Image (cartoon, helix red, strand yellow):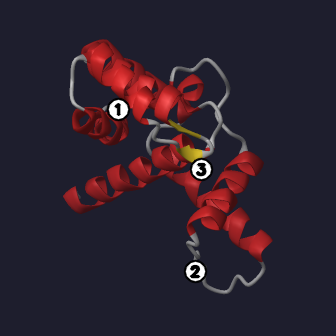
Amino acid sequence: MMTSRVTLVQKVHACLEILIKCHPAPLKILTGEIEPPCSLEVADMIQGLMADSGIRVRTSGVTSPQDQMIRCADMFERVIKRAGGWEHIVRSAMEYAAHFPSTWEIFSDHLIWIEGANGSRVDQAQMDILTQKHQVSSTTIWRRRKDVPLAIARIAVRRPSESRLKAVCKR
């Protein structure tokens, strides 16, 4: 049982990283300001990530790139659903932001000023502004950027979604 939980956390974390690296407005999705990506958008994000990084996805029995993207988008959506769905992930992100506001602000600033849908654009002047604003080192800023999506994934997987809680309470 523990192995599957860890695996699901890792999969949700990977999905969040794809969202953060490839979507033009990941913070707006994580805060519930805009709708999460649809299947076509997910396929486009994955295709862009694969093209930029040279990653190849092996899917047994699937040969066309379009079929591979559809299968990858389907796997992405299944992982999100297993974690409780986008609403649950948004609630998990907001719970994290409420409990750790300064870390969330560092994470948000990093996504806005340093990393976006076009990849990382480390500009020393921007990083210097962030280190001064938050009074932390650039290493801490990078660490917060990496830690927050994993923490959101852990919360989403470990905390029951509202729909699951309602189903349990009706029993």
Amino acid found under the numbered disc labelled 2: Arg
Say which quadrant the C terminus sits in: top left
Marks 1/2: CA distance?
32 Å
Amino acid found under the numbered disc labelled 1: Pro
Query: As rendered, which of 29 and 89 lies closer to the eye?
Result: 29
Residue indicated by mark 1: 160
Q: Furthest residue to the front?
A: 125
Residue indicated by mark 2: 58
Q: Residue visible at 21% across and 24% down? A: 136
Residue 4 position within the rendered picture, expressed as x and y whole percent measured from the top left: 30, 59
Marks 2/3: CA distance?
18 Å
User: In which quadrant of the rendered view does residue 34 lie?
Assistant: top right
Question: In the displayed structure, would residue 41 be above or below residue 84?
Answer: below
Count how many numbered circles sit on residues in the image.
3
User: In which quadrant of the rendered view does residue 127 lie?
Assistant: top left
Secondary element type, mark 2: loop
Q: Residue visible at 36% across and 22% down? A: 130
Secondary element type, mark 1: loop
